Amino acid sequence: MNFMHKLPDPDQIKEKMSVPDEVQEAVRVLLRWSGDDPDREGLVDTPSRVGRAWKEYCSGYEEDPATHLQCTFEEVEGYDEVVLLRDIPFHSHCEHHLAPIVGRASIAYLPTDRVAGISKLARVLQGFAHRLQIQERLTSQVAHCIWENLNPQGVAVVVKAQHGCMTGRGVRTHGVDMVTSKMLGCFRDDPASRKEVLALMGRA
Ligand SMILES: [Zn+2]
């Protein structure tokens, strides 16, 4: 039996979200500044679409990513090895140009006595990615959120991403990944643990 048709369509909700006049006017000003005519047919609905799109790009401001780590499992049958989620895709926007950041993150931790559901690590990443960011801070926020909420022996986060402000403007360098990492606990203090987790991530 299919229950799906009874659920509200999230796209419909978004379509109905009203965008304040001042926000739409700001987009019109930007369109004019860019050299186009905000009154031409193709751009008439752009200001309201852009307003709704930015609410979605920045939906992370409306949540505390730590809440995803409140439900944990303690019965792990003595599992005391690394838990790794590799190459999770994400979208973010840089706070300097509002340009897209598109990348993948690998997130690992060594549990002490409890683990989180596997999808929760990805939700933590998305919660911080759906804000205006710099890659270094995104990497650090994800690592510290896991460190503080799961109390593990170690956390390792490696993020590689391409920045629209670099590929689409300025030096226009295509195909260059920026790589950042944050290591906490055993992955910071013990070279063997760090080497192991980087090998598991495929980065050693
Ligand atoms: Zn930028």
Image (spheres, rainbow, N blue to C red):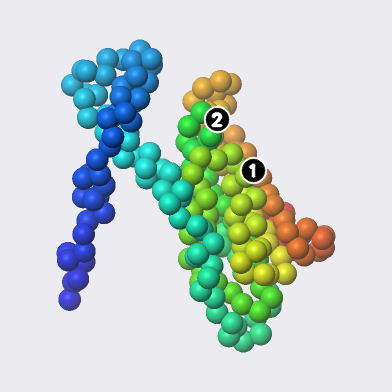
**Is the residue marked by circle 2 packed among few (<14), some (14-19), or many (20+) residues within 10 Å?**
few
19 to 86, vertically: above or below: above
Disc 2 residue lies near ligand 1 with CB under 8 A = yes
201 to 52, vertically: above or below: below
Indicate the quadrant where residue 43 lies.
top left
Q: Which residue is mark 1?
A: 136
Residue at x-position 65% and y-position 57%: 144
**Is the residue marked by circle 1 packed among few (<14), some (14-19), or many (20+) residues within 10 Å?**
some
User: Residue 117, percent across and down?
Assistant: 51, 72
Is residue 45 among the parts visible in the rendering? Answer: yes
170 to 188, vertically: above or below: above
Q: Secondary structure at mark 1?
A: helix
Q: Which residue is mark 2?
A: 96
User: Which sits earlier in the primary sequence, circle 1 or circle 2?
Assistant: 2
User: Residue 103, percent across and down?
Assistant: 53, 45
Residue at x-position 57% and y-position 52%: 105
Between 84 and 19, the one nearer to me in the picture: 19
130 to 27, vertically: above or below: below
* Residue 81 falls left or right of residue 76: right
